[in-house]
Image (spheres, grey):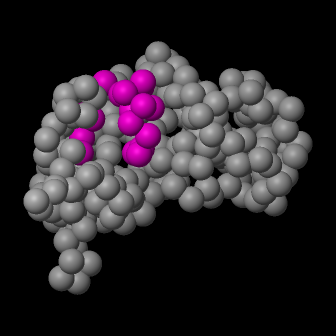
Amino acid sequence: MLELTNVTRRFGGLAALSDVNMHVEAGQVTGLIGPNGAGKTTLINCISGLDHPTSGKIRFQGTPIEDAPPHEITRLGVARTYQNIRLFDEMTAEQNLLIGQHGRGRSTFLGSLVFSSGYRAEQRQFQQRAQDLLERFKLTHIRTQVSGNLPYGDQRRLEIARALATDPQLILLDEPTAGMNPQETHLVGEQIVQLRQDGLTVLVIEHDMELISQVCDVVYVLSFGQIIAHGKPEQVKSNPTVIEAYLGTDDD
């Protein structure tokens, strides 16, 4: 579904990514792990259109997207969350989910002005979809609350729900459990597994190896901008190169 070929991103003389090759299979959960500063978020930014590679190719279902802007990539079926939560803080939880669907709307500008029957029907569909997502993520009780005032765990789950509101085929999760307690982390892990069961493809960045082992089919390891290992979670966890990248070596 997603193919990265020799993706390099340079900032001046610094190579944040260097000849990254990655293949994300449809219907699987693929993990991306690595030490802080390894280039993981830079890679997600290049896939989602917030940044662009200096060189290399990124294809989504065969379509080149390495130079495409974010809104075009979203329309193709790619959604993402952020390491630092980016909700519309002054909007309610429900409004965040409604605005996430507008890129899929088919009503014309004129139809919205005259409040046409087609526009009204579409808005009802959006409302129902928002309600379904609130129920799925156990957020119905905060439907009318301003998102900026929500507890941290609720904000994290709401951001994932908003990404789903765009009706993606591939969802990119950038450290979705950062700052969560174990119970909240487990709940998000269950939601990621459910995404796969629903037929979605997921690429998840995480530091929590327990979560990675819980949800991922395949894991890639990024260190200093390069892929140093990939395979099943249990293979990656026992890889000496990966252990060295995370823990370093004893000079003695």
* Vertical comparison of 176 with 87: above or below: above
Give me the residue at 64% from left, 34% from top: 184
Q: How many marks?
A: 0
* Vertical comparison of 129 with 112: above or below: above
Q: In the current view of this chain or complex, which residue is farthest to the top?
A: 197
On whether residue 49 falls in the magenta region, the answer is: no
Q: In the current view of this chain or complex, which residue is farthest to the front?
A: 252
- Quadrant position of the C terminus in the picture: bottom left
Give me the residue at 31% from left, 55% from top: 35
Depth order, front residue of 72/3: 3
Splitting the image into 4 quarters, where does residue 36 fall? bottom left
Tell me residue 143's x, y (percent).
84, 38
Give me the residue at 61% from left, 27% from top: 187
Splitting the image into 4 quarters, where does residue 43 fall? bottom left
Q: In this picture, which residue range is highlighted in magenta?
A: 205-221
Give me the residue at 23% from left, 83% from top: 12
- Quadrant position of the N terminus in the picture: top left
Q: Is residue 27 left or right of residue 247?
A: right
Tell me residue 167's x, y (percent).
54, 34
* Vertical comparison of 145 with 169: above or below: below
Tell me residue 59's x, y (percent).
24, 45
On whether residue 219 falls in the magenta region, the answer is: yes
* Vertical comparison of 18 with 77: above or below: below
Depth order, front residue of 247/27: 247
Q: Is residue 144 left or right of residue 154?
A: right
Q: From this viewpoint, is residue 25 visible?
A: no
Q: From this viewpoint, is residue 224 visible?
A: yes
Tell me residue 6's x, y (percent).
12, 55
